[in-house]
Image (cartoon, rainbow, N blue to C red):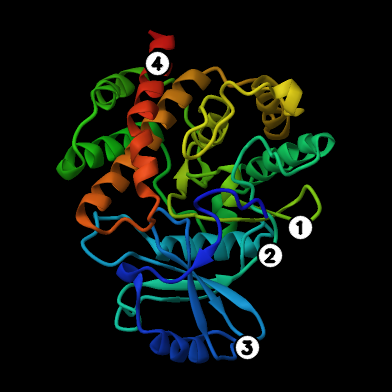
Amino acid sequence: MGDDSPFAGSGSVREAHRFDEAALARWMEANVAGYRGPLTVEQFKGGQSNPTYKLITPGRSYVLRRKPPGELLKGAHAVEREARVMAALGRAGFPVPHVHALCDDESVIGTSFFVMDMVEGRIFWKATLDEVPRGERPAYYDAMNATIAQLHGIAPDTIGLGDYGRPGDYFARQIGRWSKQYLSDTEAGRDPNMDRLVEWLPAHIPPGDETSIVHGDFRIDNLIFHPSEPRVLAVLDWELSTLGHPLADFAYHLMMYRMPSLTIPGLAGVDLVAQNLPSEQDYVAAYCARTGRAGIPGLDFYLAFNLFRFAAIIHGIKGRAARGTAASPHAAALIADLPKIAELGWQQAQILG
């Protein structure tokens, strides 16, 4: 596993996120088939929104995702939705960890949570894939591309997710949602480029609409690859998933080409030929070939929208940090990137005029 990121690995449970581990063990005995203690709990360093824990037993390990303690924004941290979409996709053969059980009884550990399999493999924190031999890197990009195309090809109705979100008007609804969240979180302050995007985006939505299952945070560091093969074993972190526009989801993934090396490193400024990585144009073409598209005419708007959305997500982390409920001790590093990402979003918008 590439573990040179501040978000990699697990360690002691942070003070703000501790809970009654004995109560969890009792719940596991009653609700997780095959569970055998004793139980040791560690907390993953990543997980900016929902605290995530490694549950270690003598025979195997599990992962627990929970809502953070404290006051939460309405609709945020919906671990129930994460568990539902992962269970449905797993039954459809899409690569996700197996979900064992969901607990909405807050008396067990203080908040709702679910338990899933711990998938062993490699997580790459840098899109440059420095840990992978140069000649093998294109195959890993192709596996990423195939995985997101596979997701967008699954009809929600066929796997019981027809009501997982509202179809239609995705961009208008998302812009409204993130704008409202940004403007209402007064503890996180304001950013001039975010203010500009709040005004600009609703007036420039491209025509046309589509609906698919969207992940909402499809990045290379949210994928677990096979220990030795260019194959995606599991897609993680479904908190932002819903029914939405597949090209919005793909453009969020594609932002890696436009993002500089910030806390979450991007590829802007990287010599792609020297790294033996596909160009943005070739990566888009591969997705289009897999999804039966001739091209993506509104791509510049989709990228501006996603830079705004990403900045709004970090703005939410900034607000949670101010309120003392941020899930990761590395939240400050992401918060420091907020002005740069908002500026990138406004620069992208100005390409369209």
Q: Name the amino acid, label 4.
A: Gln
- Amino acid carrying label 3: it is Gly
Which quadrant holds residue 128? top right
Q: How many marks?
A: 4
Quadrant for the N terminus in the image = bottom right
Above or below residue 280? Residue 291 is below
The numbered mark, 4 or 1, whose residue comes first in the sequence reads 1
In the picture as drawn, the residue positioned furthest to the right comes out as 135
SS for callout 2: loop
Image quarter of the C terminus? top left
Mark 3 vs 1, N-terminal side: 3
Dot label at residue 186: none
Between label 4 and label 1, give the one nearer the viewer.
1
Q: Is residue 226 above or below residue 309?
A: below
Residue visible at 76% across and 57% down in the picture: 227
Q: Nearer the viewer, mark 2 or mark 3?
A: 2
Name which of mark 3 and mark 4 comes first in the sequence: 3
Q: Are marks 2 and 1 in contact (CB under 8 Å)?
A: yes
Q: Nearer the viewer, residue 81 or 345?
A: 345
The amino acid marked with disc number 1 is: Pro
- Work out how far the residue at label 2 is from the one at label 1, CA to CA, in angstroms: 8 Å
Proximity of marks 4 and 1: CB atoms separated by less than 8 Å:
no
Q: Earlier in the sequence, mark 2 or mark 3?
A: 3
User: What residue do we see at 46% from left, 46% from top?
Assistant: 243
The spot of residue 130 in percent (x, y) is 70, 39
Look at mark 2 in the image and give the residue it sits on.
120
Nearer to me, 244 or 10: 10
Q: Which mark is residue 227?
A: 1
Label 3 – label 1 distance at C-alpha = 25 Å
To which residue does mark 4 refer?
347
